[in-house]
Image (cartoon, helix red, strand yellow):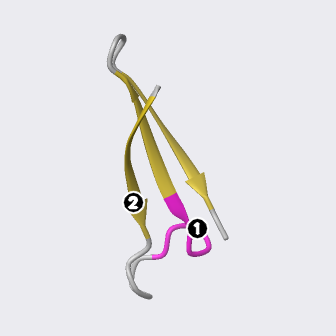
Amino acid sequence: MTFYAQLDSLNDEVVLGDLGMIYVFVCFDCLEVTALLQTA
């Protein structure tokens, strides 16, 4: 899987988990997508 993108919390309006980060991975061979949520 290849790292593709990351999504961060936006100010205090949009908070992912507990000020977390979402990491997105893509397999370009089989077109499978996986997302990982990491919180502080």
Q: Main secondary structure of the magenta part?
A: loop
Q: In the image, is 37 to the left or to the right of 28?
A: right
Furthest residue toward right? 40
Residue 19 lies in the magenta-colored region: yes
Residue 7: image location, x then y, percent: 39, 60
Residue at x-position 44% and y-position 73% = 9
* Residue under label 1: 17
Q: In the image, is 12 to the left or to the right of 39?
A: left
Mark 1 vs mark 2: which is more N-terminal?
Answer: 2
Q: Residues within 10 Å of mark 2 (few under 14, many from 20)?
A: few
Residue at x-position 34% and y-position 11% = 29
- Tell me the SS state at disc 2: strand
Is residue 15 depicted above or below 33 in this figure? below
Question: Could you tell me if the residues under marks 1 and 2 are in contact, i.e. CB atoms within 8 Å?
Answer: no
Furthest residue toward bottom? 12
- Tell me the SS state at disc 1: loop
The quadrant in which residue 33 appears is top left
In the rendered image, which quarter contains the C terminus? Answer: bottom right
Residue at x-position 41% and y-position 77% = 14
Of discs 1 and 2, which sits in the foreground? 2
* Residue under label 2: 7
Could you tell me the amino acid type at mark 2? Leu
Residue 11 lies in the magenta-colored region: no
Q: Toward the viewer: 9 or 29?
A: 29
Could you tell me the amino acid type at mark 1? Gly
Is residue 27 depicted above or below 18 in this figure? above
Magenta residues (range): 15-21
